[in-house]
Image (cartoon, coloured by chain):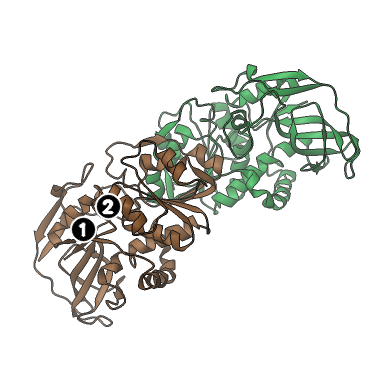
Chain colours: A brown, B green
Amino acid sequence: MQTIQLNKRPVGTPQLSDFKLVSEEKPQINEGEVLLKAVYLSVDPYLRGRMSEAKSYIEPFELNKAMSSGMVAEVIESKREGFTKGEFFTGLLEWKEYQTHNGEGLMKIDPKMAPLSAYLGVLGMTGLTAYLGLTEIGKPKEGETVVVSGAAGAVGSVVGQIAKLLGCRVVGIAGTDEKVALLKSEYGFDEAINYKTTTDMSLAIAEACPNGVDVYFDNVGGEVSDGVMVNVNRFARVIVCGAISLYNATSMPMGPRIQPILIKNSVLMQGFIVFNYQDKYAEAIPRLAQWLMEGKLISTETVVEGFENTPQAFIDLFEGINKGKMIVKI
Amino acid sequence: MQTIQLNKRPVGTPQLSDFKLVSEEKPQINEGEVLLKAVYLSVDPYLRGRMSEAKSYIEPFELNKAMSSGMVAEVIESKREGFTKGEFFTGLLEWKEYQTHNGEGLMKIDPKMAPLSAYLGVLGMTGLTAYLGLTEIGKPKEGETVVVSGAAGAVGSVVGQIAKLLGCRVVGIAGTDEKVALLKSEYGFDEAINYKTTTDMSLAIAEACPNGVDVYFDNVGGEVSDGVMVNVNRFARVIVCGAISLYNATSMPMGPRIQPILIKNSVLMQGFIVFNYQDKYAEAIPRLAQWLMEGKLISTETVVEGFENTPQAFIDLFEGINKGKMIVKI
């Protein structure tokens, strides 16, 4: 069986050589353990942070050890109560085709309620990030304007749809004309902007948001966000969920200082990490599942086939290759 | 009688020539009005914003019209119920030695409870800004570390004292050795840093805050704040109250992008304007008054004599000439 390990800590954009595929013996389980077979694997921009040595909200990955992320796995063998062969579970698992587990932190999932991959997307960390970031920090009111960056990405596409369901005007920012078209035709965004072909983001946002910006769900940081921030309304809320444009920076990224805007408009800006809101999962998941089953929430996935293609799928996130959630099928 | 008008909109640091002293006839009151004589006048950094044309949370001052700020005035003549000759009121008033007023928005003050000037300081906008910014956004818990920039200024010196009263470790940042000494000897700060003689602010903060920074009350913005922000703890709260280091900038001030820090540490950063918390004044003022009367809160004032010296007193704020609240005695 294969495992994917961290070979080197990346400098700037991750390279294939930062990973290595290593063969290992298929493990045996002890009493109280289960043997899991990986089925789907989630690659997410936040993993870039764990590849660096710097301390953050999760421990860095260790060199020459398997990496890990959200995964869906099937129980192949069980010596633990509550786990039966053939059942599916989701949780933070190692990048291994097979692994033993004591079952802690895993959540049983129902393949009849939703496709298995949805538990890594709309019904997983992605959907929870979108829903809880938007509702707990953004607190959008009906009729308000919500701007989403990285809008065609995993989290962004869900944020926009939820904001529409909550009665807001929704403007998305993405990086290709195809994505921009998709935001409007598929996800129901009111307006969408291609930042790569827009020379004046601040003007483009002003035009797309005639009533200003009340909530900004930021997945990208950088110059795109500078253009949004000059258009925020009084008492605007900014969910700082991601900064993918800055993750691979090799020197300190500089930009306009934000404090004068925050003061002038009494803006709230808050860093958001879904793991801090675990007490809200139980309330969020049924709501997301209901929207999904009612067809009100479209779950888009870019599925890459083959465990060995995981590193490339991860690298492609930073090129914006994916539409919606990037998933590896193992 | 004299009035001080806005002569020109400043470019960069305000100059004396941006103001003009104009003689006017002493006004007469109509039925329902009072005639007020200015006694004390408050000069505050936020007035710089009103001297510019740009829209903000308060209207810009108009050219060739009197400027205004928080003032204490005596009733000289009254044709309005509830206002008696010899009483003192505070409120947002025009920079005129005498003015008529319909009484709306004025608060009667008691010269026996506290010196009149305190109603522009600890018991006025300054004290309310310090108390409400710290408690409503900062929410400091006993034992946490609170850092204050502009610590020897009007708001900063009160913030530090209140944070001590609430049981926090308090570190102040100021711009002279004399102020640094004062922070520790007079206001009871645990540590104080002279940013002008410190080459590595981030290191200085790390040393002064061995447990990291839980609350940052920011009055200055700029490089001082950059040094604080790299030391914030998980779930830190940043009250963005002022950015005096940026107010006179003639081009867009640039600095390290803040988003990665906010994400990594789930930091809340919020622009604070005291006027948004008017419903909390009634609860805050008695608490401040009690601390003041018990001697637990020291009110420091730099009092400049003479109405005509108001523009210079205002300009001196940006040089950090003042200790505590800068007030003009008329």
Name the residue carrying label 1: A67
Whichever of callouts 2 and 1 sits on the residue coming sooner in the sequence is 2
Residue situated in front as seen by the camera: A136 or B294: A136
What residue do we see at 42% from left, 54% from top?
A: A190
- As drawn, B305 above or below A316: above
Q: Which residue is mark 2?
A: A50
Q: Is residue B306 visible?
A: no
Q: Residue furthest top?
A: B17
Kind of residue sitting beneath label 2:
Arg
Q: Which mark is residue A259?
A: none
Which chain contains the residue that carries disc 2? A
The image shows residue B177 at horizontal and vertical percentages of: 54, 27
Q: Position of residue A42 (x, y in %)?
A: 25, 61
> Is label 1 in a helix, a strand or a loop?
loop
- Seen at 66% across and 44% down, the residue is B128
Q: Chain of mark 1?
A: A
Q: Is residue B163 left or right of residue A252?
A: right
| Residue shown at the point (88%, 29%) measured from the top left | B28
Local crowd size for mark 2, using a 10 Å CA cut-off: few (<14), some (14–19), many (≥20):
many
Three-letter residue code for mark 1? Met
Q: Quadrant of residue A158?
A: bottom left
Q: Nearer the viewer, residue B245 or A327?
A: A327
Mark 1 neighbour class, 10 Å CA radius: few under 14, some 14 to 19, many 20 or more: many
Label 2: element kind = helix
Residue situated in front as seen by the camera: A163 or A34 = A163
- Residue A66 visible in image: yes
**Quarter of the image that includes the C terminus of chain A:** bottom left
In the picture, measured across the screen, residue B308 lies left or right of residue A12, that is right
Q: Is B220 placed above or below A177 here?
A: above
The quarter of the rendered structure image containing the N terminus of chain A is bottom left
Q: Say whether marks 2 and 1 touch (CB < 8 Å).
A: yes
Q: How far apart in space, not on screen, are marks 2 and 1 (Cα)?
A: 9 Å
